[in-house]
Image (cartoon, grey):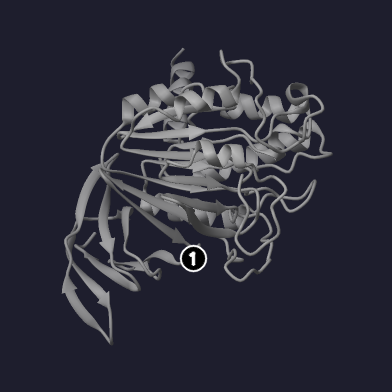
Amino acid sequence: MRRVLLLVLLVTLVVLSYSEIIKSDEVSKWAQDHSRSPFTFVVFGDSRPVYMNTPIPRAFLTRVFREISWIDPDFVIHMGDVIYGYNESPSRIDKEMEDFLDVYRKAAGKVPMIVIPANHELQPSEYSFEEFKKNFGNLLYYDFFYGGSHFIVANTNFPSSIRGNLPRYGFENLNDGYHKRKMIDWLGDVIKEKANHTFVITHVPMFSIEGEPRYGNADSRFMKMIKDVDAYFAAHRHFTYESSTGKTKLFILGGGGATIDRETYANGPEGVYAYLIVDVYGGFVDYNLVVPFSVDVVREGNTVYVINRTTHSITFRGVELRSKPKSAYKLGGKGLSYMPVKVRTRVEGGHIYATVSVPPKSAVVIKESGG
């Protein structure tokens, strides 16, 4: 009996140490229980293998999630395509899904993640569709409130069992089987709800990029419905793009590990991998793109260098220290200039973590006390 109890305790500790996937069926309750303001979230997508029966980009994705763990946002929204799926066996689909979740759980610290529906999970087969629902929830379109902001997830990739002969991609008025209203009718209602900020997310972008031919999946109905929101995030296309229409910011963030589509346009996408940090401060929202390997935490003995090579300030909340810092300095500008920096620490599970805001293109040097 003692061995059984010990085994149960060990299993419980392992589960509790993992990062947390928030399923679509549970996200409203989770957001209600954990909501705070101000808050930060990260959004990106497309981390699938390059082709069928090939590995996920494990090393790259580990790096991305590790950086996210240093920034330590309140949650991550991954915009789908985490497996390849098409023409793959159930065992292969299982392995790719397990590998993706394994990387996330080992590298992302305790940052919760929401994964939205995408074509590489929903369309290849009923098996891949069921695996998506098992891991990420049954609802294919849904909304939730967090910190006074409204998040709306619409679906652009219903599986064949739901869409019938309709196009594989697009904004169709279909029901996932868990709603009273079909998606377009539902969206027409929830988009009107009052919030400090409203963010809309889909996998396939519903707009064309300036300077390119009309995008085949663009849908003016959808864009008209969301014309008053703060920002619209999409992925699917493997590059990084930022624009706006009216007061709405538009992002394509498909640089999560899949092969980059290196198309170029006059005002077009950047052929870079990237994720987006969104800081929500009451009435103000700050959007900052980060190219992986632009931030770093390096330890040399009892000195920790927290490095920000981007052109905007980034707050690192998950920098682990072995002991309490006794001094911190900003390193940057012309030559070597030292300026005292405030570093907040917290103790969690016997570990000490630092929170430090690092200015653009500079570093913060944290000299720890011995031990």
> What x and y, as percent, mark residue 153?
52, 33
Give the quadrant of residue 76.
top left
Q: Give the x, y percent position of residue 293.
A: 49, 65
Is 170 positioned to the left or the right of 299 in the image? right
| Residue 36, placed above or below residue 371 | above
> Is 155 drawn above or below residue 249 in the view shown?
above
Q: What residue type is labelled 1?
A: Phe
- The residue closer to the viewer here, 184 or 285, is 184
In the image, 101 versus 267, the foreground residue is 267
Residue found 31% across the figure and 31% down from its top: 35
Above-or-below relation of 322 to 108: below
Q: Name the residue under label 1.
A: 293
Residue for point 26% across, 60% down: 357
Residue at 65% of width from left, 30% of height from top?
132
Residue 357 in view, yes or no = yes
Quadrant location, the C terminus: bottom left
Estimate how packed mark 1 is, as few (under 14), some (14 to 19) or many (20 or more) residues with alpha carbons within 10 Å.
some
